[in-house]
Image: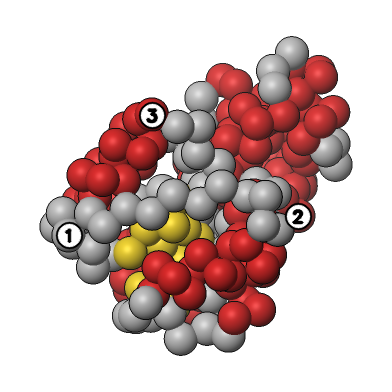
Amino acid sequence: MVRRALREAVTDTLGESVQVEEAGSVAEARNVLGRLPVDLLMLDLNMPGMDGMLGLNALRVEFPAVPILVVSGIDDPIIVRKTMELGASGFLPKSVPFATIGEALRALLAGDLWFPQGLAESAEPADDDEFAARVAEFTPQQHRVFMLLAQGKLNKEIGFELAVTEATVKTHVSRILSKLGVQSRTQAALVAQRLGKSALLREQTR
C-alpha cells in the first residue's frame, strides 16, 4: 500500500512517462540499482534487509551518485538527523500530505536536500570553525563546485566550467549540502560567505 501511494505521488509529480521500479527488500533494491540508471531512490527504513541504519549506509557507499530519500513512519528528530549524517538527501515521514511528497521529489531531483521543516532550526547551529572543518573534508572537485556555487552559478554553468556533466554536478552539490548539514544551495552559499568574512576578519586582526 505504501509503495502504491508513493508510485502515485511520483507519477503525479513527474508525469506518467517516468519509469518507477519497485523493490521489496534491500537486496531487490540493490539489484535494480545495479542494472538500471536511477535518478532517485526512495528507501523505507523498515524494509527487509535494512538492519536499522546499516542498509542505508551500505547503499550510500555502493551507489554514491544516487540521492536517497528516506521514507519512514517514525519522524523522531534523532533518527532524521542520523539519516542526514549517513548521507541521505532527504527524509519523508509517511504522515506528510500528498503534495509534500512532490515537493521533496522536486527538491532532490534539483540537487537540493529535503528534510522536515524545523529540523535545521532544532539542531545546534554550526560555528565558523565547525563549518571550516566540514569544508576541509571536501574532495578537490567538491571544493571547486562549492566555490562556484558560492558565486551563484547554476549546475549547467558549473558543469561547463569544470567540463563535467550536469548530473555529476548535482551529485557533488548533494554531497556538499549533506557534509555542511544544510538543506539548500542558498544556505551553502551563505556558509561560503560566512567563512570568507571570518577569514578576512581574522586576517585584519593579526
In the image, which is nearer the foreground, mark 1 or mark 2? 1
Q: Which residue is mark 3?
A: 35
Q: Residues within 10 Å of mark 2 (few under 14, many from 20)?
A: some
Mark 1 or mark 3, whichever is nearer to me? 3
| Residues at discs 1 and 3 in contact (Cβ within 8 Å) | no
Residue at horizontal 58 percent and vertical 85 percent from the top: 97
Where does the image place residue 203, in percent across and percent down from the top left?
72, 36
Callout 3: 10 Å neighbours few (<14), some, many (20+)? Answer: few
* Disc 3 residue type (three-letter): Arg
Q: Amino acid at mark 1?
A: Pro
Element under label 1? Answer: loop
| Residue 181: image location, x then y, percent | 52, 56
- Classify 62 as above or below 183: above
Instruction: Return the x and y of residue 170 as percentages of the image width and height.
Output: 65, 37
Q: Are marks 3 and 2 in contact (CB under 8 Å)?
A: no
Q: Quote the CA–CA distance across marks 1 and 3.
A: 20 Å
| Number of the front mark, 3 or 2 | 3
Question: Which residue ends up furthest to the front in the rendered image?
Answer: 16
> How far, Cα to Cα, is label 3 from label 2?
35 Å
Q: Quadrant of residue 93?
A: bottom left
- CB under 8 Å between callouts 1 and 2? no
Q: Say which quadrant the C terminus sits in.
A: top right
What residue does disc 2 label? 186
Residue at x 32% of width, y 80% of height: 74
Identified at 33% across, 64% down, the residue is 44
- In terms of sequence position, does the residue under pointer 1 or pointer 3 come before the other? 3
Residue 48: image tag: 1
Q: Check disc 2 and give the amino acid type.
A: Thr
Q: CA distance from mark 1 to mark 2?
A: 37 Å
Vertical relation: 86 (above or below) 39:
below
Residue nearer the viewer, 89 or 81: 89
Instruction: Looking at the image, tell me whether mark 1 or mark 2 is earlier in sequence order.
Output: 1
